[in-house]
Amino acid sequence: MSARENESIESAPVNLSKPGSGLDPDFFQEDLMQMTKAVNYLRWQVDLFKRYVSGNLLEIGGGIGNFTPALSRQSESVVSIEPDPFCFKKLQEATSSLENVTIHNVKAEQLDDHIPSNYQADTVVCLNVLEHIEDDLAAVRLFQRRLHVGGTMILMVPAVEWLYGDIDKSVGHYRRYSRRGLRSLVLKAGLQIETLKYFNLVGLLGWLWNVKVAVKKKQSDSQILIFDRFIVPWLSVVEKFVPPLIGQSLLIVCKKVNP
């Protein structure tokens, strides 16, 4: 599927994509747009997993296109799905000039209805999306069925369960993850773990301050810009050589070893 196709499809009855009860659509959109300003942070995240990306790629939850252009440069083709109308419109804008990207306005559970059954990806990427899905195990099992045997699945999720708070609820998160919980999840889905690590220790401290000390309801533009401009450049280098024992996010890379 290398030809570009923009396809708006009516939503099926909700299942995997049921939003969290605390979701505030306006806050969710504002938070997404805020993070577009964190250019260095977005680049750092891509650098963490780009060496695992190859071939035909399936992106689960393209969002507003923060990662899709970079993924298109690392792979032969990208099929990206995004159910949210606001995000899908932004995703269209971000990928309109990318000839090897195909996007679909569908939910995760609609994959089999709208993407040919013979489509098998070499890489499946799900970045900051799994926490929005109520039945995350069913979702990972669904995604791995679209992988070739030997293919790679990359998941990125918010970490540290006890940090779950109002900001998480407002953006529609069902949960944050522990290292043990994420490991158990992918093993239950029949995947073999290649690497599992925390990253962004400083971001964790900032999130702790916002949620537990200052009890803030949202991130500020100034916090994001200071973090992105003055902290990410050196933090990304330090963590490359000294991986943190805990961090704001978890990255897991898995292989599909059985049909």
Image: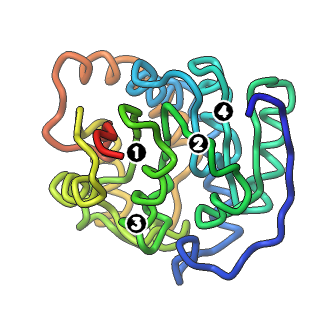
| Residue picked out by circle 1 | 156
Q: Which residue: 38% across, 51% down?
A: 157
- Residue 204 locus on image (x, y percent): 30, 47
Observer-nearest residue: 176 or 113?
Answer: 113
Mark 4 / mark 2, whichever is N-terminal? 2
Contact, CB < 8 Å: mark 2 with mark 1?
no
Question: Is disc 1 in contact with disc 3, using a CB cutoff of under 8 Å?
Answer: no
Q: Nearer the viewer, mark 1 or mark 3?
A: 3
Residues under numbered marks 4 and 1 in contact, where contact means CB atoms less than 8 Å apart: no
Q: CA distance from mark 3 to mark 2?
A: 16 Å
Residue occupying the point 38% across, 69% down: 215
Percent from the top left, x then y, of residue 106?
72, 60
For marks 2 and 1, the one nearer the N-term is 2
Secondary structure beneath disc 3? helix
Q: Quadrant of the N terminus?
A: top right
Instruction: Estimate the spatial distance between the alpha carbons at disc 3 and disc 4, rounded to whole Å.
Output: 23 Å
Task: Write down the residue under mark 2.
Answer: 59
Identify residue type, mark 2: Glu
Q: Residues within 10 Å of mark 3 (few under 14, many from 20)?
A: some
| In the image, residue 163 above or below residue 47 | below
Q: Nearer the viewer, mark 2 or mark 1?
A: 2
Q: Nearer the viewer, mark 4 or mark 1?
A: 4
Q: Amino acid at mark 3?
A: Asp
Please give the residue where the numbered disc 4 appears in the rendered image.
78
Give the secondary structure at mark 1.
Answer: strand
Amino acid under label 4? Val
Q: Quadrant of residue 29?
A: bottom right
Q: Earlier in the sequence, mark 3 or mark 2?
A: 2
Mark 4–mark 2 distance (CA, rounded to whole Å): 7 Å
- On screen, residue 150 versus residue 217, left or right, reads left
In-front residue for pair 187/51: 187
Q: Is residue 202 visible?
A: no
